[in-house]
């Protein structure tokens, strides 16, 4: 049990000035990552479109991979859909579904958290609130799309994702294509990251003192074991970053995992340091639910700037609903936690807990 210190995950680079790697740059300092995320000269690698209803169409239509001229309008579609969802209600729904699932599995004595809960509950709750006709069937479809969403997926995964996009469209409420794509985009963005957050919170926090609020647990786990470890940008012209000359078209890998341990921002970087709601700056506590009354201060795991995560409060609400129930009813099983190999995500493949 690593509490109350969480060491860096394997392969986390040290925090320092930008480092040239493979013709691009790795950016690790908190201030440098924020500078890139808020500078319009650095853009998200754009996904080309594809035949309607396919994975490449989805990638080419969601805000996440859109060029700067298309991004604001498409992001607004997702933000508008999220505005109708109340984080308190999401949290309560995730709590209920988690309790039902644990009741069903209680006789087995142990639960594999990732498959039974972390990968299922947030998506099923979100899919229902976003109006998908069959929320339970949406879960495997969204998972299949998420597995092929980022560049470099193998052809079998892409073919599977193509079928999943068609299935998700068929169960979506009627809407113009761009709105439908960005609604599905919300689910796909939510999938791995929220599952990874729940996995990290269970791994590091199941045996934490009950006095530690779940919001504080989630905030520090997001900082110290982020489910999204990095994101990418491309320089549209020659720029300078922290004294380094960044060439036109240079690729930048922005390492949230390193920046979240920047000693310039966190004097004891590896130490779990809950910040009470009173000290929280911008806070999920705006939502008013006690489980959400905590900070997300200074961790960069939800990104920053005009492309920062619009689902932060929803993610925290859904994760809190699941994690609170697990903290009350389960204890660590002590079995090793393994992770799916991925260039930027850190999501356990399996994570067992025992009933108390
Ligand atoms: C722990 C869970 C989550 C984490 C760590 C996370 C993290 C992020 C990050 C870092 C980005 C920005 C990527 C970049 O700038 O390159 C992002 C974007 C996005 N996230 Fe999340 N996210 C999470 C959950 C969610 C949820 C639950 C939703 C929806 C309900 C969501 C919807 C989105 C969308 C739509 C974008 C693209 C925004 C845009 O195109 O401007 N995320 N997320």
Image (tube, grey):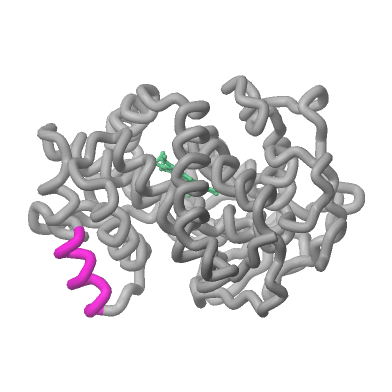
40 sits left or right of 71 in the view: right
> Does residue 112 sit above or below 247 in this rendering?
below
- In this view, the residue in front, 226 or 99, is 99
182 sits left or right of 190 in the view: left
Residue 8 coordinates in the image, percent (x, y) = 76, 66
The number of callouts visible is 0
Q: Is residue 40 visible?
A: no
- In this view, the residue in front, 182 or 16, is 182
Residue at 49%, 62% (x, y): give it.
Answer: 105
Q: Main secondary structure of the magenta part?
A: helix
Residue 209 coordinates in the image, percent (x, y) = 84, 48
258 sits left or right of 168 in the view: right
Residue at 77%, 27% (x, y): give it.
Answer: 277
What is the quadrant of the N terminus in the image?
bottom right
> Does residue 163 sit above or below 10 in this rendering?
above
Q: Is residue 47 visible?
A: yes
Q: Which residues are magenta?
A: 155-164
The residue positioned farthest toward the right in the image shown: 267
Residue at 30%, 56% (x, y): give it.
Answer: 142
Residue 175 coordinates in the image, percent (x, y) = 13, 32
> Does residue 44 sit above or below 285 in this rendering?
below
- In this view, the residue in front, 152 or 253, is 152
- In this view, the residue in front, 93 or 38, is 93
Residue 191 part of the magenta segment: no
């Amino acid at each position: 049990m690593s509490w109350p210190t969480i060491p860096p995950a394997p392969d986390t680079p040290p925090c320092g000035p930008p480092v040239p790697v493979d013709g691009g740059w790795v950016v690790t300092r908190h201030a440098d990552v924020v500078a890139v995320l808020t500078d319009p000269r650095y853009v998200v690698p754009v996904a080309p479109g594809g035949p309607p209803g396919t994975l490449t169409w989805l990638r080419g239509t969601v805000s996440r991979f859109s060029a700067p001229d298309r991004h604001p309008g498409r992001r607004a579609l997702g933000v508008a859909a999220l505005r109708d969802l109340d984080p308190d209600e999401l949290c309560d729904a995730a709590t209920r579904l988690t309790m039902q699932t644990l009741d069903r599995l209680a006789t087995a004595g142990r639960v594999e958290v990732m498959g039974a809960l972390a990968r299922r509950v947030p998506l099923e709750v979100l899919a229902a609130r976003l109006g998908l006709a069959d929320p339970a069937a949406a879960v495997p479809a969204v998972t299949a799309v998420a597995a092929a969403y980022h560049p470099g997926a193998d052809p079998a995964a892409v073919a599977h994702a193509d079928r999943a996009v068609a299935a998700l469209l068929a169960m979506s409420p009627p809407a113009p294509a761009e709105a439908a794509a960005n609604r599905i985009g919300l689910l796909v963005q939510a999938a791995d990251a929220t599952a990874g957050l729940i996995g990290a919170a269970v791994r590091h926090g199941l045996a934490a003192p009950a006095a530690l609020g779940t919001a504080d647990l989630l905030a520090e786990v997001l900082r110290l074991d982020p489910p999204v470890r990095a994101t990418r940008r491309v320089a549209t012209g020659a720029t300078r970053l922290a004294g380094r000359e960044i060439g036109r078209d240079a690729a930048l890998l922005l390492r949230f995992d390193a920046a979240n341990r920047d000693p310039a921002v966190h004097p004891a970087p590896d130490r779990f340091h809950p910040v009470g709601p009173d000290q929280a700056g911008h806070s999920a506590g705006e939502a008013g639910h006690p489980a959400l009354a905590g900070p997300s201060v200074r961790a960069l795991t939800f990104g920053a700037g005009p492309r920062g995560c619009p689902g932060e409060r929803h993610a925290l609400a859904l994760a809190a609903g699941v994690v609170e129930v697990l903290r009350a009813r389960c204890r660590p099983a002590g079995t090793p936690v393994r992770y799916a190999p991925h260039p930027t995500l850190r999501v356990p493949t399996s994570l067992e807990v025992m009933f108390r």
